[in-house]
Image: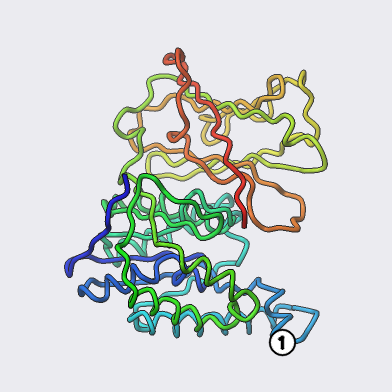
Amino acid sequence: MTRNLTLSATDRLLVLAPHPDDETLATGELIQLAVRVGAAVRVVFATDGDNNPWPQRWFERRLRIGNEERARWGERRRGEARSALGKLGVDAASTRFLAWPDLGLTGMLVEDDKTIEVLVEEVSAFAPTHVAMPSLRDRHPDHGALRVMVDLALAKSRSQSVRLGYVVHGRTADADGWRLEDDAIRHQRKRDALMAHASQVGLSRRRLLRWADQPETFDRAESESTLAASPPSADRILRIPLLPAYRFLRQHDLLVVLGARGKVECARIRLPRFVRSRADGPLADGLCSGRVHVELASGVLQITFAATTDSTATAYVKLERTWPRLIIFDAETWQRLEDFPTLPGTDAQHASAVRVPQRASI
């Protein structure tokens, strides 16, 4: 059931945006609502959106994009974000840019936990009551990676904030979340703010306005993971069939992120390019302090998470396409282990089936 989202003057809204323009597309009306009722607002941009070559080629009439040109484009997009937020009622002092690499957040996530520590500091400093951040359903790799980072940062900082997950790329209506009441004036102001992102609107005006015109809806996430209420007493097994989708001309890695005992551990496992139905054998063992085992059995990827008594443990997995992409969007997004359905009749092993995501029209 979708509920109307309301805010009060005592609330504190923190918006985490992967790129400039996401803040307006996904939360332009939410920000206005917070400002109108007197709630504190802070907007944090993970990247400057500088790895954006085709619009830059179009505007600057150049073919080659080097480091200097990319840095200049990032500065332009920062300025556009400040201008858009000004139209929404947020001043520059309430805006923060982390300058992480555009299209590089997945790599940063699985490399180490430095990004998570930065987000812990942001959360601790602002003490939000509400956090708006990308949904795991979003098809852009930066969006999904940022969501995993923020989830882990909120857990580590023990934040009890209301978590609002938004989808920009591949948006579908959420049947069990929050939405804002319709307000024509607020919506028009959002459209006006979007025009401040001239570098993006110039080449994709109709598409961006179509996204902006969709109602602002948000996934409703619990403040703690499902595993926190009932930690598993036995190993939990996740099974992902790899036939036939991963068979031809595509190289994939399995990405695993495990947060437990205030520590975040990550692993990257190269999957075989060709998977035969009779292929069997271990791919990796003893990952994440010995708690994760990966094997291939009859064309099915089997990931075993060892039993733990840690009530704060949570895990995320993703099948990451590693070869160069013509289209940047993901076919498979990050998913939490505890969101997978447990197979009937397997209580002893806590076996889970994969939820194969539906491909969306971008």
**Which element is circle 1 on?**
helix
Could you say where residue 242 lies in the image, as x and y percent from the top left?
69, 31
Decide: few, some or many residues near mark 1? Use Cα within 10 Å; few <14, some 14-19, many ≥20.
Answer: few
Query: Which is nearer the eye, 270 or 201?
Result: 201
Q: Looking at the rendering, in which quadrant would you find the N terminus?
A: top left
Rendered view: 335 above or below 85:
above
Rendered view: 43 above or below 262:
below
Could you say where residue 317 lies in the image, as x and y percent from the top left?
55, 39
Tell me the residue at 69%/85% (across/down).
Answer: 59
Query: Which is nearer the eye, 346 or 171?
Result: 171
Could you say where residue 223 lies in the image, as x and y percent from the top left?
30, 46
Figure label count: 1
Could you say where residue 254 lies in the image, as x and y percent from the top left?
64, 39
- Type of amino acid at the residue the image marks with label 1: Glu
Q: Looking at the rendering, in which quadrant would you find the C terminus?
A: bottom right
Find residue 63 and report its image quarter: bottom right
Describe residue 60's horizontal placement relative to residue 147 as left or right: right
Query: Which is nearer the eye, 252 or 107?
Result: 252
Tell me the residue at 79%/36% (across/down).
Answer: 273
Tell me the residue at 61%/29% (across/down).
Answer: 240
Query: Which is nearer the eye, 137 or 362?
Result: 362
Q: Name the residue under label 1.
A: 60
Describe residue 191's horizontal placement relative to residue 107 as left or right: left
Describe residue 178's horizontal placement relative to residue 284 as left or right: left
Tell me the residue at 20%/75% (across/down).
Answer: 38
